[in-house]
Each structure stands twice: as C-alpha cells, then as structure tokens.
Image (cartoon, rainbow, N blue to C red):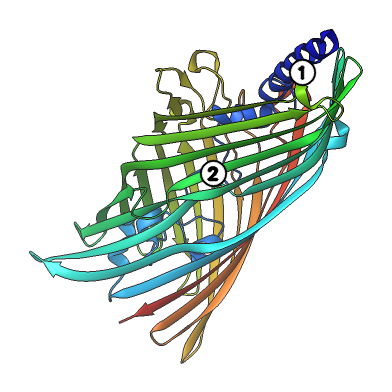
Amino acid sequence: MNRHADLVRISTVAFLCFLLIICSGSLSSVFAQALQRIEVPSSLNPVGSGARALGMGGAFIAVADDATAASWNPGGLIQLETPEVSVVGAYFDRTEDNTFGTNPEASGEQSISEKRINYLSAAYPFIFWGHNMITSINYQSLYDFTREWNFPLTQASGNLSLNQNVDYTQEGSLSALGIAYCVQITPELSFGLTLNFWKDGLYPNEWEQNTLQTGSGVYVGNPFIFESKSYTKYSFSGFNVNLGILWHVNNKVTMGAVLKTPFEADLRHESTFNSSIHYPGFPAADSSSSIASAEDEKLDMPMSYGIGFAYRFSDEFTASIDIYRTEWGDYILTDSDGNRTSPISGEYISDSDIDPTHQVRMGAEYLFIKQKYVIPLRGGIFYDPAPAEGSPDDFYGLSLGSGITYGRFIFDIAYQYRFGNDVGTSIMKNLNFSQDVDEHTVYSSVIIHF
C-alpha cells in the first residue's frame, strides 16, 4: 500500500510538473503564448489584391485602375470606364528554417503551401448629377494563418526528463466583404471609399490551432508515457473603412493616398486542453486532465495609411512608388477580464514596445502594344517589415509579372518572392529562437469588361 501511495504521489507530482512544462516558458511556450499572441505567418501589413499590382511590387496606390482599386485605393476606381468582373486566385509556398538555440534537436525547416481565392469583384460605372461615379462589390482574403510545425524535443529539469514530439498546425484566414463607391469631383481629382465587413458567419472568418505533444519521460527513476492535445479557435467580426483619393497632377504624374481606419473587432475565443500520463508498470498511478473555456474578447486593429506616386514616361511605360505606415502599437487584445496585451509579443501593453512599420514599394510596367492585343511586362521590389517587440523584423522581396489583354478579356499572372533572415528573435527569447523565412507567391487574375 505504501508503494502504491508513493506512486500515486509521484504520478501527481510528475503530472503537475508535466503541465508546468507544457504551459510555461519551455519550448512549448510557442503554443502557450498563442493564447496571448496572435500568430500570422503571412505578411501582417494590410495590402491590396490582384496579379497586376503584385507584379509591380505592390506599388499600386497611385495606379489603381482596375477593380482591385477598392483594396488599394478606392479613389482610383473612377478610372474604370466600363462594367467589369474580376477574380484573383492565389498560391503560396512558405518555408521557415527555425533555430532553437537551447534545443538544437528542434531546429530545422518547416514548410507549408496553400491555394485560395484572393479576390472577387463586380464594378459598375454610371453618371449621376453630372458626375462620373462607380460602385463595386468585392471580396478580399487578407490574412492567412496557415502553419505546420513538427519536431522532436528533449527536456530535463531536476529529477524530470522528457523526450517528446510536437505536432503543431494552424489554419484559417481573415477576409472582408467590401462595398465601394467613387466619385469624380473634378476632371483631375476623385474620391472613393470602401466599407469592409469582416463578418464570421457570412463566410469563415476564423482560425484554429491544434497542438499534439506525445512522448515519454522519467521522474525520480519511474518511466511514464504522456500525451497532450490542445485546441484553440478564434472567430473574428468587425467593420472598417478604406478612404482614398487619386489626383492626376498632370499628364505625367499621378498621386494617390489611402487611409484604412482602425476598428475594434469582436473575437470569440474557444479552447480545450486534454492530457494524460501513464505508468506502464503501475496503471493505478495513471492520471488525466481536461480543461475547456470560451470567452468573448476584443481586438483593436490598427490604423494604416499610405501615399503613392506614379510617373508615366510614355503610353507604354509607367513607374510607381508607395510608402505605407501601420500603427502596430495600437494593435491590442483585451481578454474577458479586461487584461490588455500586445498580440505581437504577448506582453501586457504597459510592458510592450511595438513600433510602427513602414513599407516601401517600387514597381514598373512596360506595355508591348500590338494591333489586337497588349502584353505587359512588370517588375517590382519592396521592403515589408513585420512588427516585433523592440523593432520590426526586416522582410524584403521582389516580383515579376506579365499577362495579355485581348478584346474584353484581361489575364494577368505574377510571382513574388518575400524573405526575412534572422527574424522572430523577440519571441521565445528563453529558447534563443530565430528563423529564416522564404515565401513564394503566385497570383493569377481574369478581368472581363462588358
């Protein structure tokens, strides 16, 4: 009986130690922190859609002359002279080469690929009160949460040692349904706005995290087998507005400006945690635990704004540049108890230091104009930093694009390469974590004029 009582006591202590390791500042903090951090593996900076824009490096605020203008600069929509519909498909492949300085066995490459509809739109121009106007309805997928990590982990602390395998997946996306309107105020100046409805239920506006940790260990000379499963789901709903102007300064220079308003999103946060520990020689000492919770939270999304210039060298050649700023210090998660944390760092707002990010994008387009068709050649480069504790992580990229315009039909395709080296160092500092990221994206779009 004493031996059995000792094993029960040992099991209980080991189980508590196990939970402490799983939920505290060890390697699994990347998952425990997910309860406070919001992990967005793709670019966090709000950008527009479309293969043409992507091919120009995303320098599109002062160009914005197709239906994707609703996502870049709704003030540019007035440049559409006929009704049109468009669809944009996207494919990406991302590789994260992770380094855990304290646990080199967990280091290595993790890859994921995904394809989805990036944009849908229908636009209709008209004249009212003597002014050119246009309205459009648009669907845009903005943020992608897809990530898969699988790696081994060895840990030891006092009389406890663990050998485990961690399998972590995250999937989901955030999208907005937009209703856009633009009016030509003068022949040179137009103003537009897009009302964005981020509504879960109208379409899936949510993301999920699943973590499975399995392995074996020894506590005070007693071997055991353990397993834990955690699941987290966020559902997101909100509303904001894109405001934009487009000014044709002269027949060569165009200037555009856009403001994307901040907003408070409703966040439904559901989570479960199940774990068990088994002693092969003494099943009476086995233990298990299950925890579930659901709460309503608030997520303050930051304001962002940008300015762009385009220079038309000739009918065939146009170059553009955009500068864009996002106020990530105003990106705040408020839980059901009123605690305010930074979704970037997981720290309390009072302890967090998140600077704004500044994107710089440059691009160009050359048109080979033939009698019956037009073939474009596009290219661009950009600096697209990711918000991080202390200072932003540096990400850079380049893009290429082409396509064909034939009659009422326009087909565009673009490729983008985005990369960051030695990024992510501000998270999981106790693990000396960093990663190199390589992301390849392909957009293809079809536009039909009526």
Q: For the image shown, how many numbered marks are present on the structure?
A: 2
Q: Nearer the viewer, residue 255 or 221?
A: 221
**In the rendered structure, which disc, 1 or 2, sits on the residue that comes first in sequence?**
1
- State the separation of the CA atoms marked 1 and 2: 32 Å
Residue wearing tag 1: 11
Residues packed near mark 1 inside 10 Å, few (<14), some (14 to 19) or many (20 plus):
many
- Left or right: 117 as drawn, with respect to 247: right
Q: Nearer the viewer, residue 175 or 294?
A: 294
Residue 205, given in percent of the width and then of the height, sits at: 42, 49
Instruction: Identify the mark at residue 256; answer none if there is no mark.
Output: none
Q: Are marks 1 and 2 in contact (CB under 8 Å)?
A: no
Residue 70, given in percent of the width and then of the height, sits at: 35, 57
Residue wearing tag 2: 208
Residue furthest bottom in the image? 371
- Left or right: 291 as drawn, with respect to 62: right
Question: Residue 432 occupies which quadrant of the picture?
Answer: top right
What is the three-letter code of the residue carrying label 2? Glu
Question: Residue 263 occupies which quadrant of the picture?
Answer: top left
Q: Is residue 248 in view? A: no
What is the three-letter code of the residue carrying label 1? Ser
Residue furthest left in the image? 129
Rendered position, 159 above or below 62: above
